[in-house]
Amino acid sequence: MLRFSSTLLVLTALIAPHTAYSADKALGEARYEETCINCHGPAGKGAASYPKISGKEISYTTAKLEAYRKGIEQGPNSFLMISMAQPLTDEEIANLAAYLKDAKYVVE
């Protein structure tokens, strides 16, 4: 019976669909460069009334973007952020959060 249970567990793990994926910092940077940079500046350093968004924990950035995507207001620029976050997929949010965690602004 134990052998059957172990075999069944292994087969289930192999057959079950895997929805987890690892975030891709390069794709996050590319997505950031498409739109986010216009307000938050290079590497998320912040610009004018738009806050610095780099250096935050992945869970923090993910939660903020998911809340904006749901239409939840979180500050003075919420209207703009909601419209920018709504088209983001879960994968894009993960990629952006991974990129922003370690993004550094380098003056050339």
Image (tube, rainbow, N blue to C red):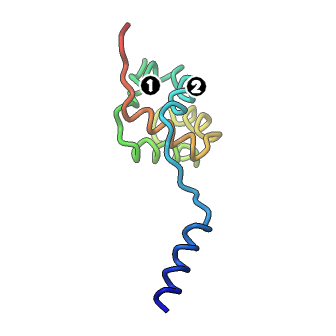
Q: Residue 74 carries which label?
A: none
Could you tell me residue 95's position as x and y percent? 51, 38
In this view, the residue farthest toward the top is 108
Find numbered disc 2 in the image and state the secondary structure of the residue it sits on. Answer: helix
Q: Which sits in the foreground, 82 or 29?
A: 29
Task: Name the residue located 62 percent from the left edge and 68 percent from the top edge.
Answer: 15
Could you tell me residue 54's position as x and y percent? 38, 30
Q: Which sits in the foreground, 91 or 60?
A: 91
Quadrant in which residue 51 is drawn: top left
Quadrant in which residue 30 is drawn: top right
In this view, the residue farthest toward the bottom is 1
Q: Which of marks 1 and 2 is in front?
A: 2
Amino acid type indicated by mark 1: Tyr
Gap between marks 1 and 2 measured at Cα: 13 Å
Could you tell me residue 75's position as x and y percent? 45, 37
Provide the residue designation for mark 2: 35
In this rendering, the answer to whether 46 lies above or below 73 is: above
Provide the residue designation for mark 1: 50
Q: Which sits in the foreground, 5 or 24?
A: 5
In this rendering, the answer to whether 16 lies above or below 8 is: above
Task: Name the residue located 52 percent from the left edge and 73 percent from the top edge.
Answer: 10
Q: Do the residues labelled 1 and 2 touch (CB within 8 Å)?
A: no
